[in-house]
Image: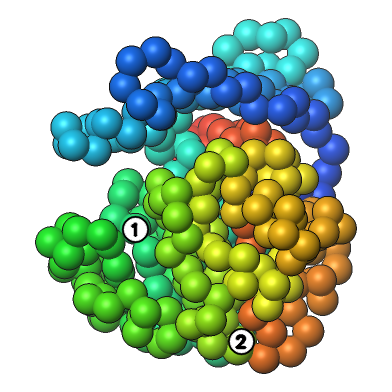
Amino acid sequence: MVEQPGLLAALASAFRGASTTPPRLHYPLPGEGGAQLLVMPSWSEREAIGVKVITVMPANASRGLPTVDGSYVLLDGQAGSPLAAFSARSLTALRTAGVCALATSVMSRRDAKVLLMIGTGNLVPFLIAAYRAVRSFERVLVWGRTAEKASALAEKLSRDGLQVEAAADLGAALRDADVISCATLANEPLVSGALVRPGTHVDLVGSYTPKMREGDTDLFRRARVVVDTATAFDESGDVMVPLQEGAITREVPDLSALLSTPSLGRTSDQDVTVFKSVGTGLADLATARYLLGRHRSLR
């Protein structure tokens, strides 16, 4: 069982500490459009080494199979021997949700009551659980391109007294939300800056290639922006396009800087804030080490 406070503390420590995370390697695969192989290594001094191998298969959605899958191997930093292996899909979901919740705990208003979740994929339940660990939401809205999927997911997630409902109108949902999380494979922006209310926090989770976008340039022009790591400027259309259009600069702070100086994220209840996550091996490594430690403590 994952205890969110413990995972968030492990992630915060990792972003504040020293580690080496080479650039993520992308290999396009032949055949169906958009298929990729990703390799993500990271190591923390000589304490631990981790490598994640991921496949991204967009066509799997129509087959009822996971779009993202793969494996993660955790190695002893001194001996190099394997310590544990994890499902990359589950590990990625946990670490992504944890990193987003960590940023949200600093960047969103403390009185945020309405969460809008855009997307209906495997990551969504993990994100909602992580957000709930840092803010007391009264309502959760779920929007997806397929209304049936959004309704089914909302029904599945409705428990523990939390009100989860499918949003039929994305524009209206954007106007209602205090926190917006977008986790999709969209190539065109879904979050319009013109529709986001003052004081709203936006997490953009899905864009990890230059052609993918979830938020429009107006959103970035209005917002105080933080990225998980500087890699976002080389990989994500969400920040590459606003950078090219002059809406932001490369001086945008990263999560490590935010944790040291929270005012980089929010200075007033009227600020619109954006956190852009592209994923980093140091978060994978921190999550794997946390899970192994948790497993050992429960034996």
Query: Identity of the amino acid at label 2?
Result: Gly
| Total numbered badges shown on the rendered structure | 2
- Secondary element under disc 1, as helix, strand or loop, is loop
- Secondary element under disc 2, as helix, strand or loop, is loop
- Residue at 40% in and 29% down: 34
- How far across and how far down the image is residue 97, in percent? 50, 54
Q: Nearer the viewer, residue 188 or 257?
A: 188
Eyeballing the image, is 219 above or below 87? below
Visual colour scheme: rainbow
Q: Quadrant of residue 238?
A: bottom right
Eyeballing the image, is 159 above or below 16? below
Residue under label 1, please give it.
119
Q: Quadrant of residue 57?
A: top left
Instruction: Say which mark, if any, is on residue 291.
Output: none
- Give the left or right position of residue 2, taking residue 111 as reference: left
- Residue at 61% in and 87% down: 199
Density class for disc 2 (Cα within 10 Å; few <14, some 14-19, many ≥20) is many
- How far across and how far down the image is residue 37, in percent? 48, 20
Residue under label 2, please give it.
199
